[in-house]
Amino acid sequence: MKPRILFLTTLCFCFVLSLSVEAQQSQKQNSPQPATSQRELLYLPPDSPGWKVTAKDTLGAYAFVESIVEPQTGPEPHRHSREDEAFYVLEGQLEFRVGERRMVAAPGSLVFAPRGKPHTFKNVGTTPARALVILAPAGLEKFFEEREALRKELATTDPSYPGRYKALAEKYGLEFSSDWSFPPKE
């Protein structure tokens, strides 16, 4: 019962974020944006990892992706300048670091990493872990598409790869640091 309650809480969180994003967008613009189309009903079977809901489904308010993390792996420390990120653990155990805090999250746990705060995670178990990742606002899904295209175009050992990857990350407001040293944000 507890995972179901946390999942519903997560959905409510996304709904509130979508209202917040709409309000922010309205304040930034004097003229209304033209409406874009949304799918009225979206159903994905439970065995389909990857992007569940994207910017086009939520008018840019948020996106959901189901992430599968292999044992003893995870992303290098990073921070987002545009998105808040929440992780709802479905299976396995993920160790998170958000700012200076560390925690191990089991199934049913929700970890929130606000924009501007360095964070990372690692699967500390012996089997793949699964998490539903919520990004608000949406849009970072394009970074992952472009990163995949870059990896197909260039080997990561190519001398130009690090510069191209850094430029791509900057385009999407991402910073990476393998030693956890981030300069302060102004």
Image (cartoon, rainbow, N blue to C red):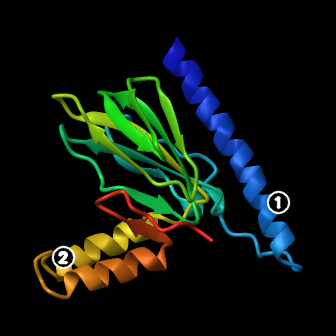
* Kind of element beneath mark 1: helix
Q: What residue is shown at x 16% (from left), y 82% (from top)?
A: 154
Give me the C-alpha separation between circle 2 and circle 1. 39 Å
Image point 24% across, 80% down: which residue?
162
Above or below, 101 relative to 145: above
Callout 2: helix, strand or loop?
A: helix
Q: Amino acid at mark 1?
A: Ala
Q: Up-down: is 57 above or below 13?
A: below
Q: Residues within 10 Å of mark 1 (few under 14, many from 20)?
A: few
Q: Residue at x 51, y 31 (%)?
A: 110
> Which amino acid does the dot numbered 2 rest on?
Lys
Residue 129 lies left or right of residue 107; in this view the side is left
Image position of 121 (left or right of 9): left
Q: Residue furthest top?
A: 1
Measuring from the top left, give residue 165's x and y in whole percent. Answer: 30, 78
Q: Nearer the viewer, residue 116 or 49?
A: 116
Check the image and name the residue furthest to the bottom: 160
Q: Residue at x 12, y 78 (%)?
A: 155
Label at residue 131 = none
Q: Nearer the viewer, residue 91 or 50?
A: 91
Identify the image quadrant of the C terminus: bottom right
Relative to 143, is 57 above or below?
above
Q: Position of residue 175 (x, y in %)?
A: 42, 68
Which residue in the structure is indicated by mark 1?
A: 23
Q: Quadrant of residue 105?
A: top left
* Residue 44 visible in rendering: no
Task: Give x and y (percent) for residue 59.
Answer: 66, 62
User: What residue would you read off at disc 2?
Assistant: 152
Residue 186 position (above or below residue 53): below
Circle nearer the N terminus (2, 1): 1
